[in-house]
Amino acid sequence: MFFSRLVASSLFVLGLTSAVVSTPIPQPETQIVKKQLPDLLDTLSGLQATISPILTDITTLAPTGGDISGLIGQIGDEFDSVTTVLSGLVGQQIQTDPTQLVTSIITSVLSTIGQLPVISSATGSKVDSSVSNFLDILNTLSPGILSTVGSAIPSVLGSDLPLSGILNLLNLNSLTNLLSLTNVLTGLLGGLLGGGLLGGLL
């Protein structure tokens, strides 16, 4: 009798042990979080929307003689922020063509700054560096875009502005030099005509 109870108890304990061993221990669920990459066109559109009112303020304030260095500095800061965002896209396959949007952005910046009578070297160097870095990262994401954008920029640039980085990247220096030479020749011709030298020779 005692032996039967002992056997029964042993079988009961063995059954519990088997049940515990065979029951899988629940593991914490592993969640794979994919990094949300910024959209190129949305980011560029955001940049355009941000700098447009700043450029308008520059255009409005400049003729009054007001200090616009802070506003131009803001333009540089906005380009720096976008460059940081776009750096997260390096190595990714870009499916969209940002050429038209980039051309519009750069044209608006150059045309606004090009209309200013003068800006300090420090202010010009800041925006030049910021926009140049922006163009560099864009050319990494979309190789060849700088050539396309440069060829689409209207020929209205200030040749004496400290924006050599931008002009070099977009291959606009030759255009700027040509405009400078044209202005010089026009001035000389006007002086000759005004002085009556050509008239006397004729």
Image (cartoon, rainbow, N blue to C red):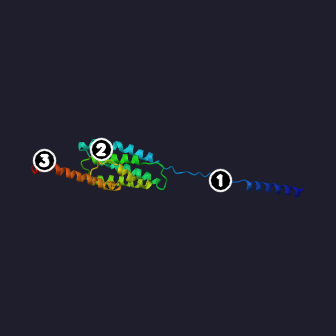
Pointer 1: what residue?
27
Residue 120 visible, this orientation: no
**Position in image of residue 153 (x %, y %):** 34, 48
Identify the element where label 3 is drawn. Answer: helix
Residue 135 visible, this orientation: yes
Q: Nearer the viewer, mark 1 or mark 2?
A: 2
Q: Which residue is found at the position 29% from the left and 44% from the top?
A: 58
Q: Is residue 190 left or right of residue 149?
A: left
Nearer-N-terminus badge (3/1): 1
Label 2 crowd (10 A; few <14 / some 14-19 / many >=20): many
Q: Nearer the viewer, mark 3 or mark 2?
A: 3
- Judging depth in this view, the residue of 27 and 114 nearest the camera is 114
Give the Cα distance between marks 3 and 1. Answer: 93 Å
- The image shows residue 47, relative to residue 177, as above or below, that is above
- Judging depth in this view, the residue of 138 and 143 nearest the camera is 143
Identify the element where label 1 is drawn. Answer: loop
Nearer-N-terminus badge (3/2): 2
User: Which of the 4 image quadrants contains residue 133?
Assistant: bottom left
State the quadrant of the N terminus: bottom right
Q: Nearer the viewer, mark 3 or mark 1?
A: 3
**Residue type (three-letter) at the residue carrying disc 2:** Ile
Pointer 2: what residue?
58
**Position in image of residue 103 (x %, y %):** 37, 48
Identify the element where label 2 is drawn. Answer: helix
**Residue type (three-letter) at the residue carrying disc 1:** Gln
**Pointers 1 and 2 in contact (CB under 8 A)?**
no
